[in-house]
Image (cartoon, grey):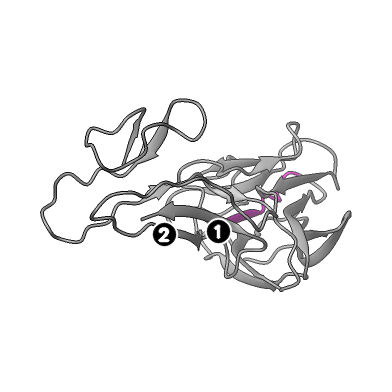
Amino acid sequence: LSLHDALPISGTGPNKAQGGKWFMFLETSGGGNNVGKSWLTAPTLRTNTMSMRFYYHMVGANMGTLRVQTAPLPATQNFESGWGGYTSSTTAVPNWRRGTRTPSSGTGPNKAASGKWFMYLECSGGRAGAVSYLNAPGPFASTTKRGRLQFYYHMTGANMGTLSVEAKVGKKWNRVWFKKGKQHANQNTKFSRASITLPAKTIGLRFKGQKGTSWSGDMSIDNRSEERRVGKECRSRWS
C-alpha cells in the first residue's frame, strides 16, 4: 500500500483524490498471478461510535476484493514496557510506582508475577489511611454485557492497608473487589490471582490503594487482563 497523488499505471485507479490531493492505493503491479493480501491497519479505536465512513475507488480489468475488518485487541498489561497508560492519582507518598523490587525490606514481593516489572504502592511516607488510585487507561465504551477482570496481587507487610478495585458505572465508582491486611506470608510468596465479574455498563476501572498504619504496607499488582473487553476497542483494516 502506498500514499500517492497519482497512480503509476494507466487504466486502473482514480485520476485524483476524493478531497485534496493525496489518497491511499494498493499497488498490484507485481506478484505474478498468485492471490496476495495487504493490510492497511488503522490506529486503535476506543469509542462508542458504531459506524465508519470512507470513500473508495475500484476500476481495472483485474480488480480484486476490498474488505474492512474489525478485531478486538487484547486488553492485557504486564508493565514490562512501561506504565501502559496507567496513571497514579498522587505524586506525594503514598503513590503508585513501577519497579522490579520495592525499596523497603519486609514488604512488597521479591519479584514480579511474571517477567520483571510490576506496580506497587509506595508507603514510606504520608499519613496513615491515605489513598492513591492507579487509574486504568480508557475510556471504556458503555455496554450492557458484563466483562471479567483478572490480575495478580501481592500484599505482605506488618502494616498492610487495603487494596480495592473500583468500576465506574455512569458517574459513580463502585467497589467490586477488595482485600484488607496482610495476605501473603513473606516477600518470597507468589502473587495471588483475582478474577472479578464487572458490572454491566462499566466505563472506567481503577485500583485503590489505602495505606495502613505505617510504612510496611507496599501492596503490588501485575498481569492485569480482561477476558472480554468492556466496550469497543478495535482496529480496522483493508484487504
At 80% from the left and 36% from the top, the residue drawn is 126
Instruction: Give the amino acid type for the residue marked by disc 1 in the picture.
Output: Ala
Q: Mark number for residue 75?
A: 1
In front here: 196 or 40?
Answer: 40
At 71% from the left and 47% from the top, the residue drawn is 135
Whole-percent x, y for residue 44 in the image: 53, 48
**88 sits to left or right of 5:** right
Whole-percent x, y for residue 182 in the image: 71, 63
For the record, the magenta segment spans 215-223
Q: Are marks 2 and 1 in contact (CB under 8 Å)?
A: no
- Looking at the rendered image, the quarter that the N terminus falls into is top left
**147 sits to left or right of 62:** right
Q: Quadrant of residue 95?
A: top right
Crowd class of label 2 (few under 14; some 14 to 19; many from 20; radius 10 Å):
few
Q: Mark number for residue 67?
A: 2
Question: SS at mark 1?
Answer: loop
Q: Which is nearer the N-term, disc 2 or disc 1?
A: 2
Instruction: Give the amino acid type for the residue marked by disc 2 in the picture.
Output: Arg
In front here: 181 or 13?
Answer: 13
- Looking at the rendered image, the quarter that the C terminus falls into is bottom left
Distance, label 2 to label 1, CA atoms, is 25 Å
As displayed, is residue 54 above or below residue 93? below
Whole-percent x, y for residue 237 in the image: 43, 53
For residue 214: magenta? no
